Amino acid sequence: YDYAMKQYDEDDIILYGRSLGTGIAANLASNNKPNKLILETPYYSLMDVARERFPYLPVKWLMKYKFLSHVFMQNVTCPITIFHGTNDSVVPYTSGKRLFDSLKQKTIKFYTIDQGEHNNLIEFETYLEGIEEVLQ
């Protein structure tokens, strides 16, 4: 972000995060003032995802970095766009929807990609139209 700030006005910066990178993008957006934040297949918290994938492990004790996206997102002031597929087997759709539902911002859009998986959202018209709309 610091490098981008040397090259561009902050109002020209759009942050994009995908999968694990959504927590990092949310953290950056919470500490800066980008023009927009776009999250693809985000999670409520990494702990949330780990508990669902590994219910038999004490993930709370095993994870060094929790990536609490829902906490970071409370301080984001720019418009937010979220894309999530209903058939995502890596980051469950319910985790991304829970993140969206936890936010109070007026400038937030959530795109449900019906039948979308973790790595194929770009193949869906809903995703393409949404990306085009947010980048205009």
Image (spheres, rainbow, N blue to C red):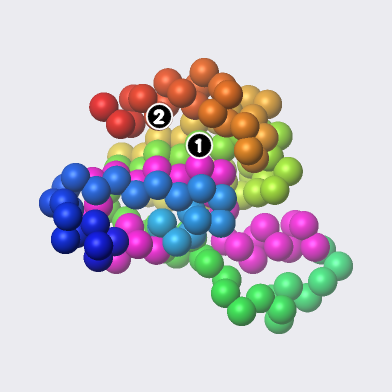
Mark 2: which secondary structure? helix
Name the outermost residue toward the right: 56
Give me the residue at 41% from left, 57% from top.
26
Furthest residue toward left: 9
Q: Classify 10 Å Cα crowding around label 2: few (below 14), some (14-19), many (20 and above).
A: some
Real-space CA distance between mark 2 and mark 1, rounded to the nearest whole angstrom: 9 Å
Can you identify the residue that label 2 sits on? 131
- Can residue 34 be found in the magenta stretch? yes
Q: Which residues are magenta?
A: 27-54
Left or right relative to 131: residue 18: right
Image quarter where the C terminus lies is top left
Could you say which is closer to the camera, residue 73 or residue 134?
134
Q: Residue furthest top?
A: 125
Residue 112 at x, y = what percent?
55, 30
Mark 1 nearby-residue class (10 Å; few <14, some 14–19, many ≥20) = many
In this rendering, position of residue 74 left or right of residue 32? right
Pick the quarter of the image with the N terminus. Answer: bottom left
Q: Where on the picture, by quarter, is residue 54? A: bottom right
Residue 122: give x, y in percent of width and height.
Answer: 54, 28
Q: Are marks 2 and 1 in contact (CB under 8 Å)?
A: yes
Q: Nearer the viewer, residue 6 or 103?
A: 6
* Residue 35: image location, x then y, percent: 23, 46
Q: Earlier in the sequence, mark 2 or mark 1?
A: 1
